[in-house]
């Protein structure tokens, strides 16, 4: 179990396989921690770091795939119905910006003025 697992290999696995792999890694980590207390062997200490990173890798892949599946489920719904953690982040300024409809909105008075007094077109002498 000490070999380094790659993220692209983990992405091919399904949910149950990932959880099973995670369980194995956690049991291995606990056994390494026990071995660390009994005898501080340098090779075991180094292995703890690799196992912890492997656990983090499995959890990352699991959470990413779960989030992508949820995004696919909510894809057909309007943006206000999608949970906030599934929405695309962009930037804070873009999220706060007016929508196109809001930006183009004009009052009745401004609309009447635009119709009654259109922009003048001047002939420019060349």
Image: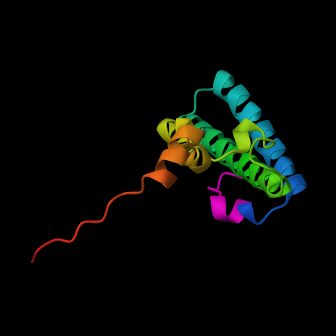
| Residues in magenta, as a range | 1-10
Q: Is residue 46 visible?
A: no
Q: Residue furthest left?
A: 126
Q: Quadrant of residue 69?
A: bottom right
Quadrant hosting residue 123: bottom left
Residue 105 placement: quadrant? top right
Number of numbered discs: 0
Compare residues 53 and 116 and report the one nearer the observer: 116
Q: Main secondary structure of the magenta part?
A: loop
Asked if residue 2 lies left or right of residue 17, the reply is left
Q: Assess whether residue 7 is covered by the magenta stretch.
A: yes
Residue 37 lies left or right of residue 17; in this view the side is left
Vertical position of residue 106 compared to residue 115: above or below? above
Quadrant where the C terminus is found in the figure: bottom left
Q: Nearer the viewer, residue 78 or 61?
A: 78
Residue 126 in view, yes or no:
yes
123 or 16, which is in the foreground? Answer: 123
Residue at 60 percent across and 42 percent down: it is: 47
Residue 103 coordinates in the image, percent (x, y)? 53, 44
**Rendered residue at 57%/50% (across/down):** 100
Question: Which residue in the rendered view is the most extreme toward the right?
Answer: 16
Query: Where is residue 11 shown, x and y percent of the image?
Result: 73, 62
């Amino acid at each position: 179990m000490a070999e380094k697992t790659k993220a692209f290999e983990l992405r091919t696995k399904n949910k149950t396989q990932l959880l099973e792999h995670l369980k194995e890694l956690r049991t291995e980590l606990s056994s390494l921690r026990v071995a660390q207390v009994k005898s501080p062997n340098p090779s075991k200490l180094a292995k703890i770091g690799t196992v912890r990173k492997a656990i983090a890798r499995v959890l990352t892949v699991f959470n990413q795939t779960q989030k992508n599946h949820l995004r696919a489920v909510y894809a057909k719904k309007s943006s206000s119905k999608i949970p906030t953690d599934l929405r695309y982040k962009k930037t804070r300024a873009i999220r706060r910006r007016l929508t196109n409809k809001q930006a183009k909105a004009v009052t009745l008075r401004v609309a009447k003025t635009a119709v009654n007094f259109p922009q003048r077109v001047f002939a420019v002498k060349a």
